[in-house]
Amino acid sequence: MTFVRSAEMKITLAPDQEEMLSTKEDIKTIIRDNPDTVMAFDIFEGVDLIGFVLVHRFEARKYFLWEYAIDIRHQNRHKGTKALTEFIGYMKASHAAEEITTTYIYGNDRAKHVYEKVGFVETDVVDEPDCHEVNMAYYL
């Protein structure tokens, strides 16, 4: 896998998956307005664009995995797990990452499965009237 800096998300998702992420317009704005703390990458397998990842550095060597998705044409082929595993290695080698945190919407079993398979552990659950998220962390 290759990770190439990006200024926007270019992949296609299923309609039900789009609601799990920020809009493409919001992602573009986030990247543009936070050049010192936000990094976005297109994920390539050979010459094929298969995914997108956006991270936010919130402390030295600590990153929040803000957006992560695999293009609909490449889903259900274990590419999501492989790409995330390789991205974690990339962040450790290239950015001295020591911790990567993330969240997923409670009930999103696909995200839970991928994160747990890679090695993320649940840290807590936010269960409020307008927010039902599971927080997870990966310690490098």
Image (cartoon, grey):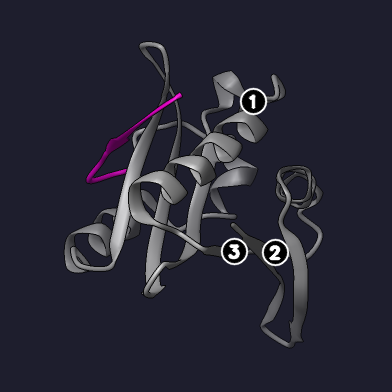
Whether residues under marks 3 and 1 lie with C-beta atoms below 8 angstroms apart, the answer is no
Does residue 86 belong to the magenta stretch? no
Q: Which is more toward the observer, 34 or 22?
A: 34
Q: Relative to residue 15, is residue 60 drawn left or right?
A: left
Kindly identify which residue carries mark 2: 105
Kindly identify which residue carries mark 3: 102
Q: Secondary structure at mark 3?
A: strand
Q: Which mark is residue 89?
A: none
The range drawn in magenta is 1-9
Work out whether mark 3 precedes mark 1 in sequence or the reverse, and give the earlier one.
1
Q: CA distance from mark 3 to mark 1?
A: 20 Å
Image quadrant in which you'd find residue 95: bottom left
**What residue type is disc 1 on?**
Gln
Say which residue appears at 55% left-offset and 32% top-offset: 83
Q: Position of residue 28 (x, y in %)?
A: 26, 54
Q: Which mark is residue 75?
A: 1
Q: Relative to residue 75, is residue 122 drawn left or right?
A: right
**What residue type is disc 2 on?**
Ile
Which mark's residue is nearer the viewer, 2 or 3?
3
Q: Position of residue 3 (x, y in %)?
A: 36, 33
Q: Position of residue 128 (x, y in %)?
A: 74, 88
Image quadrant in which you'd find residue 53: top left
Within 10 Å of disc 2 (Cα), the crowding (few <14, some 14-19, many 20+) is some
Work out whether mark 2 precedes mark 1 in sequence or the reverse, and give the earlier one.
1
Within 10 Å of disc 3 (Cα), the crowding (few <14, some 14-19, many 20+) is many
**What residue type is disc 3 on?**
Thr
